[in-house]
Image: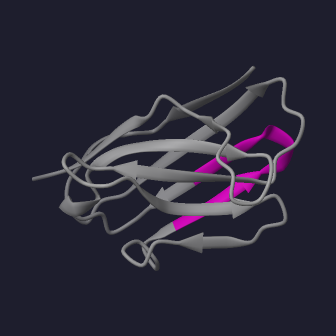
């Protein structure tokens, strides 16, 4: 089994910053990519950011330029630096791990990010 544990969520004011972390542990055969999905109440789940083990990244248009995803392959850890946060960024953020392209084989429990005055 693979376990993903997120941390770093919380309440922040608009314009503020948060840094999410996710560490994978357990029987990890390989990692192709790790990423962050988010789901706001009443909205469809969306991919916020993803990074492959080779360093290729992609971002949702809504977060590009404000969020930065990075990873430490040796630690099986992925980070999401979120700057200039907006209320519309409020969501549960889920860390994912995929062993092959286009896969999200493992999911974390989610961490709440709330952007509000």
117 is higher (above) or lower (below) than 58: above
18 left or right, relative to 102: left
116 left or right, relative to 58: left
Instruction: Please state the horizontal and vertical placement of residue 78, each as a whole percent of the image.
Output: 66, 48
Instruction: Please state the horizontal and vertical placement of residue 15, each as a whole percent of the image.
Output: 25, 66
Q: Which residues are magenta?
A: 68-79
Q: Residue at x 40, y 51 (%)?
A: 38
Q: Main secondary structure of the magenta part?
A: strand
Instruction: Please state the horizontal and vertical placement of residue 46, each as a whole percent of the image.
Output: 42, 59
Instruction: Please state the horizontal and vertical placement of residue 30, each as a whole percent of the image.
Output: 88, 42
Q: Residue at x 24, y 54 (%)?
A: 43
The foreground one among 92 and 78 is 92
If the image is split into quadrants, where does the N terminus sit? Answer: top right
The foreground one among 82 and 5 is 5
Q: Residue at x 30, y 48 (%)?
A: 91
107 is higher (above) or lower (below) than 27: below
- Which residue of the protein is positioned furthest toward the right in this rendering? 29
The foreground one among 84 and 45 is 45
Residue 68 sits in quarter = bottom right
109 left or right, relative to 70: left
Q: Residue at x 50, y 58 (%)?
A: 81
């Amino acid at each position: 089994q693979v376990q993903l544990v997120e941390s770093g969520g919380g309440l922040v004011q608009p314009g503020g910053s948060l840094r999410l972390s996710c560490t994978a542990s357990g029987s990890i055969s390989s990692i192709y990519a790790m990423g962050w999905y988010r789901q706001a109440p009443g909205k469809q789940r969306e991919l916020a950011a993803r990074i492959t083990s080779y360093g290729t990244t992609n971002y949702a248009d809504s977060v590009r330029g404000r969020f930065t995803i990075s990873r430490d392959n040796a630690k099986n850890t992925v980070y999401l630096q979120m700057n200039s946060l907006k209320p519309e960024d409020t969501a549960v953020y889920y860390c994912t791990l995929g062993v092959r392209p286009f896969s999200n084989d493992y999911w974390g429990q989610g961490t709440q990010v709330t952007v509000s005055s």
